[in-house]
Amino acid sequence: MLSSAQIAQLELQLNKLFDQCQVVTAAVVATIDGHFCAQKQRANTYSLERLATMGSTLMSLGDTITAELKMGGCDNVISENREGIVVFMHVGRDLVLVTLTTQKNALGMLLSHTRRCVEELTKTL
């Protein structure tokens, strides 16, 4: 489990993500086994605790698929939807960052900022 200092670092990085990227609607960090660690959203619209569990499950599935295909580790999973985009990314080996936007044309921006956040989280943890 993460210490309170590590959770504070997660929250700090999520705040930076939101400051730097206006298209991010919500973000959650979870452990690889689905435990909720930190969240941020622009409005209380989503149940992010459940998203933590689903995000870790989806990343595990992505890892299994890419291992079966001998394509290396799964870096991210992208879900493009009628009303937005959800991106799932590994943060090291133990955490998953899930970000979402309701802007259909913001995939590149969401990916770029989410990757940068993952890099910062990996350095600080």
Image (tube, rainbow, N blue to C red):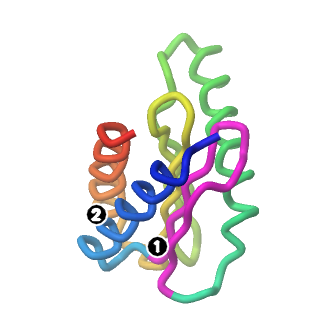
Residues under numbered marks 2 and 1 in contact, where contact means CB atoms less than 8 Å apart: yes
- Please tell me whether mark 1 sits on a helix, a strand or a loop: strand
Q: Nearer the viewer, residue 80 or 22?
A: 22
Q: Can you give x and y, in whole percent of width and height, for residue 2 in the image?
A: 58, 44
Q: Residue furthest bottom?
A: 43
Residue 12 locus on image (x, y percent):
36, 64
- Crowdedness of circle 2 by 10 Å Cα count: few (<14), some, many (20+)? some
Residue 67 left/right relative to 17: right
Q: How many marks?
A: 2
- Gap in angstroms between the C-alphas marked 2 and 1: 10 Å
Q: In the rendered image, which quarter contains the N terminus?
A: top right
Label 2's element? helix
Which label was assigned to residue 9? none
Name above or below for residue 23 compared with residue 114: below
Residue under circle 2? 109
Magenta residues, start to end? 25-42
Residue 63: image location, x then y, percent: 60, 26
Magenta highlight: main SS: strand
Residue at the image position 30 percent from the left and 38 percent from the top: 123
Three-letter code, disc 1: Thr
Please identify the quarter of the rendering in which residue 47 is found.
Answer: bottom right
Is 54 placed left or right of 9 in the picture?
A: right
Amino acid type of the residue that numbered disc 2 sits on in the rendered structure: Met
Residue displayed at 74% across by 51% down: 53
Above or below residue 4? Residue 41 is below
Identify whether 103 is placed above or below 54: below
Is residue 110 found inside the magenta-colored segment of the image?
no
Q: Quadrant of the C terminus?
A: top left
Horizontal arrangement in the rendering, residue 44 relative to residue 101 (left or right): right
Residue drawn 51% across the image and 78% down it: 41
Of the numbered discs 2 and 1, the one sitting upstream in the chain is 1
The disc at residue 101 is: 1
